Amino acid sequence: MRIAVAGLEGSEVTVHFGAAAAFRIFDLEGWELRLLEVRRVPPYTEGLPHGHDFDAERFARVADALDDCAQVVCARIGDAPAEALRARGIEPVVHTGPLTQLAAPAA
């Protein structure tokens, strides 16, 4: 399964979907994550005020770059962008903490 993780570096997921200027693209196979590439995007919320309305054009610029992913992992995401991702067949996953927890077996 291909997943996108908001943010450029580090072993922790800490970046909000709207603030992400890049997504790391991984293949998740069993319990293993394999980094494929980094995709840079114009951040969805750049220049928008807090509590902004959903902007379909800005959202599309980010989501188009993630269309081959089954999931997008981020620290936070608004309701409207999350629903718009689901409409594209991409499941938003809100997760803070180590990337390794994404691939770890359930306890």
Image (cartoon, rainbow, N blue to C red):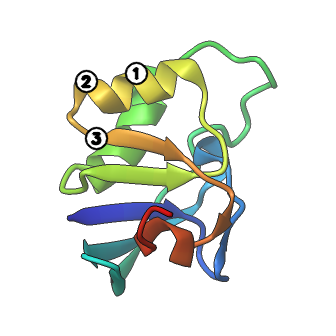
**Rendering coords of residue 7 (x, y %):** 60, 67
Q: Amino acid at mark 3?
A: Ile
**Rendering coords of residue 74 (x, y %):** 57, 52
Q: Amino acid at mark 2?
A: Ala
Q: Amino acid at mark 1?
A: Glu
Seen as rendered, the residue at the extreme front is 107
Residue 54, numbered circle? none
> Alpha carbon of mark 3 to alpha carbon of mark 2: how far?
7 Å
Query: Which residue in the protein does label 3 denote?
Result: 90
Q: Residue at x 29, y 73 (%)?
A: 28
Query: Which residue in the protein does label 1 denote?
Result: 83
Q: Residue at x 68, y 43 (%)?
A: 46
Report the label total: 3
Q: Decide which of 11, 31 is in the foreground and name it.
A: 31
Query: Which residue in the protein does label 2 denote?
Result: 87
In the image, taking residue 44 as reference, residue 105 lies left or right, namely left
> Alpha carbon of mark 2 to alpha carbon of mark 1: how far?
6 Å
Secondary structure at numbered mark 3:
loop
CB under 8 Å between callouts 2 and 1?
yes
* Residue 42 in view in this figure: no
Q: Decide which of 38, 70 is in the foreground and name it.
A: 70
Secondary structure at numbered mark 2:
helix
Q: Is residue 8 above or below residue 93?
A: below
Question: Which of marks 3 and 1 precedes in the sequence?
Answer: 1
* Residue 83 in view in this figure: yes
For label 1, the crowd category at 10 Å Cα-Cα, with few meaning under 14, some 14 to 19 and many 20 or more, is some
**Rendering coords of residue 27 (x, y %):** 26, 76
> Alpha carbon of mark 1 to alpha carbon of mark 3: how far?
9 Å
CB under 8 Å between callouts 1 and 3?
no
**Rendering coords of residue 77 (x, y %):** 60, 35
